[in-house]
Amino acid sequence: MRKKGKAGLIIFIIVLVLAVGCGVGYYFWERQKPAEAVEKFLTSVQQMDFTAMESMLQSNDLSALDNADIRNDVYAEFFKSINGKMTYEIRRNDFDIQNGTARITARIRYVDGSDIYKETVSEFLRQIVSKAFSGESLTEEDTQARLASILSEKAASLDDKFSETDIVYPVIKTTDQWKIVSLDEETVKLMSANFKSVEDEISQSLADAQSDGSTPQTPAAAEGDTIDMSAEKFSIRYTRHVVTNDFAGSPCLLVYYDYTNNGSTASSAMVDVNLQAYQNGNALNAAIPETNESAIDQFMSEIEPGQTVNVCQAFSLGDMSDVTLQAGEAFSFGGGQTKSQILKLQ
């Protein structure tokens, strides 16, 4: 009887160990499922496979991607090249087997397209202004195609800049599989190569420029400073200035400078250069001289890459006190290069 009792105890222990082992095995097997779901989702992000992405979301909602034009066919080539360079690593798995939920933390390294977008917006605005003054009109389709072309060109010419972020994905067990609850804003942001950050910066810059009651700050300049600068798209060099009258007989200032097109396409000083004049703490308005000045026509005319012309800009004067000029790059977000100079009018 004792032998039978011992045998029964051994069998019971073996069954218990197997049961516990199976339970532990099931736990760890099930624990990997939410992490695998996030891995599958992020792989579909890399591949821009929207069908697979949607299937991994409990909400089945990818509409947030459309707000960033990520599913727009015009920009498909750009976004595919960007997201194909994204990498990820699962860093943490907070698993709750009883509630059928988990929180999966993924560290994601992705292309930060801030520089690409800034360069693209600047170049796009330059081209649009140039086309507008040449009398050429663009359809919405033409405009999108031009923007997409510039995006791809800038992405290919600029070095990749990467950013890292940790995203916590809430995952839930559904009837058939584990799924991410919904598409989050951070994932949309990285898929759009940080467009949201650039959008905020541009909006803030425009808001600052258009704020009511703001007083323009006269740029700092020392005696002897001369506007002589070279940027990627152009070079300019101050040559002379003249005080004359505008069409109404009021005094105005004519500023002459050499403009060189350093770009790869035809352009003009009007499109590339931002020249401002300040007197007594106030920004001076543009003026129309009383006599025709061919250099003003040259300011508006396109020239071919490598060419140089002497151009002129006119400003209304309040009096004959000193004028401070500041030259910079038109359509340059984040400030860009500037040069200043003091002009003695008498």
Image (cartoon, rainbow, N blue to C red):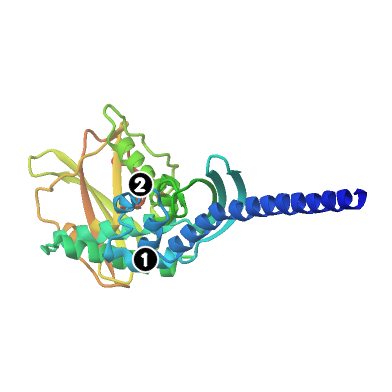
Measured from the top left, where is residue 303 in percent x and y? Answer: 23, 69
* Front in this rendered view, residue 66 or 133: 66
Asked if marks 1 and 2 touch (Cβ < 8 Å), the reply is no
Q: Quadrant of residue 262?
A: bottom left
Residue beneath the point at 13% across and 63% down: 134
Locate residue 186 relative to residue 332 in the image: left or right: right
Q: Which residue is mark 1?
A: 78
Tell me if residue 41 can be seen: yes
Residue at 59% x, 57% y is 89
Question: Would residue 301 be visible to someone looking at this image?
Answer: no
Under circle 2, the secondary element is helix
Viewer-closest of 204 and 148? 148
* Disc 1 from disc 2: Cα separation: 18 Å
Task: Write down the residue under mark 2.
Answer: 199
> Circle 1 — which element?
helix
Tell whether 344 sits left or right of 316: right
The amino acid type, in three-letter code, at marker 1 is Phe
Query: Which residue appears farthest toward the front when viewing the image?
Result: 1
- Amino acid type of disc 2? Glu
For label 1, count other residues whose C-alpha is less than 10 Å away and answer few (under 14), some (14-19) or many (20+). Answer: many
The mark nearer the N terminus, 1 or 2, is: 1
Q: Nearer the viewer, residue 226 or 39?
A: 39
Furthest residue toward top? 213
Q: Position of residue 269 (x, y in %)?
A: 26, 59
Placement of the C terminus among the 4 image quadrants? top left
What residue is at 45 percent from the left and 42 percent from the top? 222
The location of residue 261, given as percent across then percent down, is 31, 67
Quadrant of residue 201 in the image?
Answer: top left
